[in-house]
Image: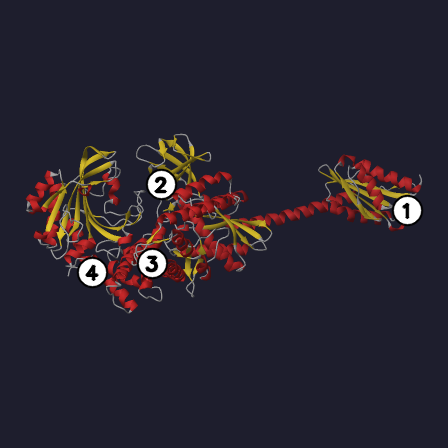
């Protein structure tokens, strides 16, 4: 038997030998077609090549492209498991020519591969052509030797392909395999063509026309070939089975499920086994390509697929989560062709186990509710839409899962009632929101979110992408278009632009089209927590609702923001290690040029604390460990040791960031809940430097820091400043501290010497208007008065003590002037304190100096004032006060 892996390899090698460049499968999330939820055909990655917007990687290409059809108009979910060829995930083999070969070579290659390489019986092959395509009809006769009755002309769109109402299009030629007359059905174009006997295995698209508004307007300048062969279908043919689920890959997955359940599949259970096998493939590849379960968008489609498979595992009697135990088998079967499965195996297993564990907690309750509601119903009856909505709203049952659960009983579901209940809930939520204190002009965002759903954020893995404009807002109201010069807010269905939240700044960048539209996005917001709003200026062209646009963020700015954000996680861990587990984040700012981190701590950090935190963070940066991301419930994350960030709002699922080296217990240096964008490895941060530490409020401290190039420049600037200081001090940078310390000591000594000199000058009489020896009499009391310039006020009292000793008995006053101000002190010898109070005398002098008060003891008092020019008047005021006291 030829294995599926062999068939894929043979196809790719066959066309490589014919000059085709092998192109790796694109991710399932399309970044070049915002109209699609998932890549659903092999040509999707080449869309811009076919439309002329991009240069092809080679004139010829070949690929095995991953595809998913489980959402939007391409939705095969309901049929999966019950038919032979419907899948949510499938592989499309294709060869492509971009203006190189055309019909003849495409048909010749296809026929050679099928009949020579794969060895298919030519008598069991037939072809269809578009009814006016005489050229293709003749080529099939010439190359394959097919008789005319096995070249069937088809007049419908089944044999005419178009990218849309506008763009490239052209006739098709489909190749069918006859599975034999033991299977009901007729050839294409016949009344019983819907039977399973004749199965399309390959479609050759001859892209030769261009259409506008659904009408062909001419020929393309370069004619292209786009083909698609379903790997699952050709594998069934080559392995001699009629049902895709009987091929080797599916049989291996089903066998693994049977082994885990300890029970072989039967006719009654085979549909459930097939659903599990198919949905396991879709789930594994979607998670590997970055899609994680959520309540909206692609994540919701993934959750629907997962829960449908999980319900069928429940029907098969699985008592514990089953899906994650099948992942190693999936990786073993397909990991060699798709290494992203190998890289993502742990994440796939953890996501499946967590989701199934959570779903099982509500599954029994939901199924009991469903049983109760359908007890009186029979085949042909309809389940009330309110019940279906309660299952969805309370128990997490997607609508189609309820339909699937009732399929075997022949019971349908009231879709209109379900939709009405959903509308009532939205209206109630809207009314509750209006009273929540949000800004009035935010109501426009609620209306958009209600109509369009959440923005799909693609920026965790991409800095560029495409989107469809779903709303344009100006001055708080929606508008249909905006022209050059308009300041607007633009919303798209998906975006790589991160909206400001969790302390991280919003992205900036450009939105454009090939038709000349250019929009400068200065910032991105995130109203309601689920819309990404691009605050922008239209620089050229006109943007309209419905336009498909290219989106490109400022990647260099994003890199700096990511580095700063990841650094806040590392500094949080370092602070807790250094200061204690009482440290928790109280706020942050993550910008492109700096980071700010607020945390709980009762005291300032010492220089040693700051140095230790810096050293720890830089050690983790140098270790360059890969940053890990996991999706968990908030409770599970916290239970596992993750730290929740201050002010962050968490939903049912949270991203858990693991950063830095693992401890002996296996826990990473930092584990936190965070929805922001981060570096891929800690080494991307490059360098970390704390530039300030300060108080924010009681018990809250703030660190401001730099990373990467900003930190390097900061260090360079300070190094240059140090060199300049060293030059001015005439020493080396290494000896600056020693030299400055020496200068400080020298200055202190000079200040001491100066104070001594001034004191000596004062004692010697040279600095005042009166000499200490020139004691005068005021009445019968000796009085010594001096004015001294430049004397430190602290030296007044020692001078007065010396003056009291010299005069023996009497009063001494000194006024020290300095830079226009004056300090004034008066001393009274102990024998005269009954007659004079130093406090009263000093107050009299201070009043002349423009001051108020003055204080001390009866024997010694001091004060001062701003009017040093009145120093002599201050001494006279003391004399006058003494005269009054003695009655002179």
Disc nearest the viewer among 4 and 1: 4
State the residue position of label 4: 246
* Horizontal relation, residue 885 to residue 309: left or right: right
Spot occupied by residue 823 in the image (x, y as percentages of width and height): 76, 42
Residue neighbourhood size for the residue with mark 2, other residues' Cα within 10 Å, grouped as few (<14), some (14–19), many (≥20): many
Residue 355 to residue 213: above or below: below
Disc nearest the viewer among 4 and 2: 4
Mark 1 falls on what kind of element?
loop
**Nearer to the camera, 187 or 464:** 187
State the residue position of label 1: 835
Mark 3 falls on what kind of element?
helix
**For marks 1 and 2 on the same chain, the one whose residue lies earlier in the sequence:** 2
State the residue position of label 2: 552
Disc nearest the viewer among 4 and 3: 4
State the residue position of label 3: 348
Q: Residue at x 12, y 57 (%)?
A: 182
**Quadrant in the picture for the N terminus:** bottom left
Cα–Cα gap, marks 4 and 1: 124 Å
**For marks 4 and 1 on the same chain, the one whose residue lies earlier in the sequence:** 4
Disc nearest the viewer among 2 and 3: 3
For residue 366, what is the image quadrant? bottom left
Spot occupied by residue 448 in the image (x, y as percentages of width and height): 42, 41
Mark 4 falls on what kind of element?
helix
- Tell me, for residue 884, which label it has, or none: none
């Amino acid at each position: 038997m030829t294995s599926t892996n062999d068939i894929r390899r043979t196809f790719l090698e066959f066309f490589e030998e014919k000059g085709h460049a092998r192109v790796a499968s694109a991710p399932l999330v399309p970044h070049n077609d915002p109209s699609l939820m998932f890549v659903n055909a092999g040509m999707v990655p080449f869309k811009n090549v076919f439309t002329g917007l991009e240069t092809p990687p080679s004139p010829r290409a070949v690929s095995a492209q991953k595809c998913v059809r489980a959402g939007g108009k391409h939705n095969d979910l309901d049929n999966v498991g019950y038919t032979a060829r419907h899948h949510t995930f499938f592989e499309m083999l294709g060869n492509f020519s971009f203006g190189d070969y055309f019909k003849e070579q495409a048909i010749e290659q296809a026929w050679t591969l099928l009949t020579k390489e794969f060895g298919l019986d030519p008598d069991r092959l037939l072809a269809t052509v578009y009814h006016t395509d005489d050229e293709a009809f003749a080529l099939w006769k010439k190359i394959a030797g097919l008789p005319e009755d096995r070249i069937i002309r088809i007049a419908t769109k089944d044999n005419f392909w178009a990218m849309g109402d506008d763009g490239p299009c052209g006739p098709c030629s489909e190749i069918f395999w006859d599975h034999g007359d033991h299977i009901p059905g007729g050839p294409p174009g016949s009344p019983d063509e819907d039977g399973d006997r004749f199965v399309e295995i390959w479609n050759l698209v001859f892209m030769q026309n261009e259409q506008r508004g659904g009408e062909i307007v001419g020929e393309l300048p370069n004619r292209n070939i786009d083909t698609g062969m379903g790997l699952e279908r050709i594998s069934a043919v080559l392995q001699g089975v009629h049902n895709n689920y009987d091929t080797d890959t599916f049989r291996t997955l089903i066998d693994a499920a049977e082994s885990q359940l300890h029970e072989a599949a039967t006719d009654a259970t085979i549909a459930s086994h097939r659903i599990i096998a198919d949905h396991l493939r879709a789930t594994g590849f979607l998670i590997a390509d970055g899609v994680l379960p959520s309540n909206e968008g692609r994540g919701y489609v993934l959750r629907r697929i997962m829960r449908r498979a999980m319900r069928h595992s429940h029907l098969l009697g699985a008592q514990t989560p089953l899906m994650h135990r099948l992942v190693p088998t999936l990786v073993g079967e397909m990991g060699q062709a798709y290494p992203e499965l190998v890289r993502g195996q742990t994440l796939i297993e953890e996501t499946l186990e967590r989701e199934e564990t959570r779903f099982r907690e509500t599954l029994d309750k939901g199924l009991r509710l469903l049983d109760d509601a359908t007890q009186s119903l029979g085949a042909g009856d309809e389940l009330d839409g309110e019940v279906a909505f309660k299952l969805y709203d309370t128990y997490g049952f997607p609508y189609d899962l309820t339909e699937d659960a009732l399929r075997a009983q022949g019971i349908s579901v009231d879709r209109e009632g379900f939709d009405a209940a959903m509308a009532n809930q939205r209206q109630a939520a809207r009314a509750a929101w209006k009273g929540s204190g949000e800004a009035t002009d935010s109501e426009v965002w609620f209306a958009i979110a209600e109509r369009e759903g959440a923005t799909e954020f693609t920026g965790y893995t991409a800095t560029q992408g495409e989107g469809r404009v779903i709303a344009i807002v100006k001055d708080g109201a929606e508008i249909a278009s905006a022209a050059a010069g308009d300041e607007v807010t633009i919303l798209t269905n998906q975006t790589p632009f991160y909206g400001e939240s969790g302390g991280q700044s919003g992205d900036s960048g450009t939105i454009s089209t090939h038709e000349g539209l250019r929009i400068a996005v200065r910032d991105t917001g995130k109203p309601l927590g689920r819309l990404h709003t691009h605050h922008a200026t239209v620089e050229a062209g006109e943007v309209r609702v419905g336009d498909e646009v290219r989106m490109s963020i400022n990647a260099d700015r994003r890199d700096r923001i990511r580095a700063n954000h990841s650094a806040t996680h590392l500094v949080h861990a370092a602070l807790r290690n250094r200061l204690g587990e009482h440290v928790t984040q109280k706020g942050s700012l993550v910008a492109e040029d700096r980071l700010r981190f607020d945390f709980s701590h009762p005291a300032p950090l010492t220089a040693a604390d700051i140095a230790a935190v810096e050293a720890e963070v830089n050690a983790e940066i140098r270790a360059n460990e890969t940053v890990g991301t996991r999706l968990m419930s908030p409770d599970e994350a916290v239970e596992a040791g993750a730290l929740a960030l201050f002010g962050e709002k968490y939903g049912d699922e949270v991203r858990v960031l693991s950063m830095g080296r693992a401890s002996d217990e296996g826990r990473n240096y930092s584990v936190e809940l965070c929805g922001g964008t981060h570096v891929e490895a800690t080494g991307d941060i490059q360098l970390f430097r704390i530039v300030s530490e300060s108080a924010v409020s009681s018990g809250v401290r703030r660190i401001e820091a730099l990373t990467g190039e900003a930190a390097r420049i900061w260090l360079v600037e300070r190094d240059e400043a140090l060199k300049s200081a060293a030059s001015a001090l005439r020493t080396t940078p290494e000896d600056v501290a020693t030299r400055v310390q020496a200068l400080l000591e020298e200055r202190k000594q000079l200040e001491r010497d100066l104070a001594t000199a001034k004191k000596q000058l004062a004692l010697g009489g040279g600095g005042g208007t009166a000499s200490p020896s020139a004691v005068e009499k005021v009445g019968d009391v000796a009085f010594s008065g001096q004015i001294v310039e430049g004397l430190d006020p602290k030296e007044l009292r020692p001078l007065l003590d010396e003056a009291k000793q010299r005069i023996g008995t009497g009063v001494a006053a000194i006024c020290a002037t300095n830079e226009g101000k004056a300090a004034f002190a008066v001393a009274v010898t102990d024998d005269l304190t009954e007659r004079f109070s130093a406090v009263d005398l000093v107050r009299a002098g201070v009043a002349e100096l423009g001051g108020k008060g003055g204080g001390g003891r009866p024997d010694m008092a001091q004060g001062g004032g701003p009017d040093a020019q009145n120093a002599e008047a201050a001494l006279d005021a003391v004399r006058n006060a003494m005269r009054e006291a003695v009655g002179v």
